[in-house]
């Protein structure tokens, strides 16, 4: 059996229709283009997903959990079983299209010290974008740059970011395990941010290929947000001071730009004092500095 160059790892919990579309579009975009395998970890689904997965062909390697384990544990399991040089983490509610993967892989040849490579994610069935890279607010919390945008400002570029979302991203398998993979203390949230920060501490950089665009339903799995507060608290406890001294300073203009847009399009979900802070940074009246 030949060794694939890419192992696509998909954690699945219900949402069978999304899984079917995800796998169909994987085949449409990758068969005959690149040598790959797909590892699927079913997280104790109860909607017919198990029966569907058992009927998949040889290209798919499927693992079944008796109990729900969550994103970090499932993806670590897939990464341990993977045979490819590259690991592509992909949510089952992400739908790929066009030439999305090969430009992401090229980044590893064209740039040094690469950690994670992500792409642009557009909300499924919408004209709005959701992710073009992750930036950090002055308070240290992460935010998707470009969330809610109707335009894509960095077309044609491969750009460095403080972090990327693991809904669709690529890392070298060797590098992923040198950093010890996803920390399983996080449950369905912030494990990708924590991994990117650990990679950054090791001198690695994260990039987004802005011409690789996929669709993302986002948050489709049941119970996806139950642990959000706990995950956020843990992230701040572990990284907060270092983020505010480093990433928040470097990201301040980009964060201000995306938060101002958020306030204009979703004022009911915007903190006015933080929006005012973003405005002063954007206009140059205030500038965060490293200590």
Image (tube, grey):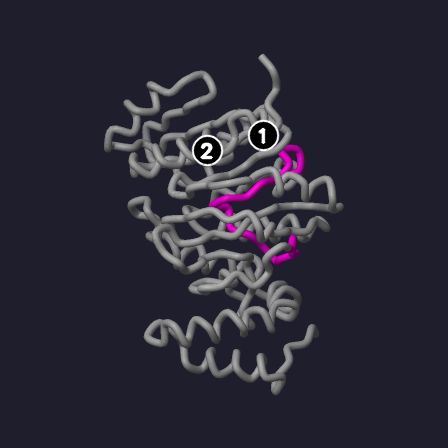
* Mark 1 residue element: strand
Task: For residue 142, say whether it is visible.
Answer: no
Is residue 165 shown in magenta?
A: yes
Which of these two is toward me, 87 or 21?
21
Mark-to-mark CA distance, 2 and 1: 12 Å
The picture places residue 285, in percent across and down from the top left corner, at 61, 87
Q: Tell me what residue is drawn at x 36 percent, y 36 percent.
A: 21
Residue at image coords 47%, 27% = 39
> Mark 2 = which residue?
26
Instruction: Tell me where residue 260 appears, x and y as whole percent.
Output: 48, 75
**Which residue, as the protein is rendered here, is positioned at the far bottom?**
285
Q: Residue at x 29, y 33 (%)?
A: 45
Quick one: SS at disc 2?
helix
Task: Give left or right: position of 248 versus 166.
Answer: right
Find the residue positioned furthest to the top.
1
Q: What residue is disc 1 on?
A: 6
11 in relation to 160, above or below:
above
Left or right: 63 in relation to 82: left
Q: Position of residue 244 (x, y in %)?
A: 60, 68
Task: Name the quadrant of the N terminus.
Answer: top right
**Callout 1 environment at 10 Å: few (<14), some (14 to 19), or many (20+)?**
many
- Span shown in magenta: 157-175
Q: Position of residue 72 (x, y in %)?
A: 47, 41
Foreground of the two, 194 or 12 = 12
């Amino acid at each position: 059996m030949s060794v694939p160059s890419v192992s696509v790892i998909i954690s699945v919990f219900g949402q069978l229709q999304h899984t079917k579309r995800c796998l169909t579009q994987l085949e449409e975009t990758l068969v005959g283009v690149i040598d790959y395998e797909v590892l699927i970890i079913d997280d104790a689904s109860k909607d017919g997903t198990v029966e569907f997965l058992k009927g998949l062909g040889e290209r798919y390697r499927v693992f079944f959990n008796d109990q729900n384990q969550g994103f970090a544990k499932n993806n670590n399991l897939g990464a341990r079983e993977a045979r490819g040089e590259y690991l592509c983490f992909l949510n089952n509610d992400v739908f790929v299209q066009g030439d999305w993967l090969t430009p992401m892989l090229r980044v590893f040849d064209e740039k040094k010290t690469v950690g994670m490579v992500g792409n642009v994610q557009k909300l499924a069935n919408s004209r709005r974008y959701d992710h073009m890279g992750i930036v950090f607010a002055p308070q240290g919390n992460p935010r998707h740059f470009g969330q809610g945008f109707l335009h894509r400002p960095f077309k044609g570029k491969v750009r460095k970011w403080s972090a990327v979302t693991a809904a669709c991203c690529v890392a070298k398998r060797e590098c992923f395990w040198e950093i010890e993979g996803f920390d399983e203390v996080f449950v369905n949230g912030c494990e990708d941010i924590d991994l990117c920060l650990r990679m950054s501490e090791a001198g690695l950089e994260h990039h987004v290929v802005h011409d690789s665009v996929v669709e993302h339903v986002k948050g489709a799995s049941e119970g996806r947000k139950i642990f959000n507060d706990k995950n956020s608290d843990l992230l701040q406890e572990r990284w907060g001071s270092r983020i505010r001294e480093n990433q928040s300073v470097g990201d301040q203009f980009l964060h201000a730009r995306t938060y101002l847009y958020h306030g204009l399009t979703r004022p009911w979900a915007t903190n006015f004092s933080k929006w005012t802070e973003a405005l002063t940074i954007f206009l140059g009246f205030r500038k965060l500095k490293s200590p």
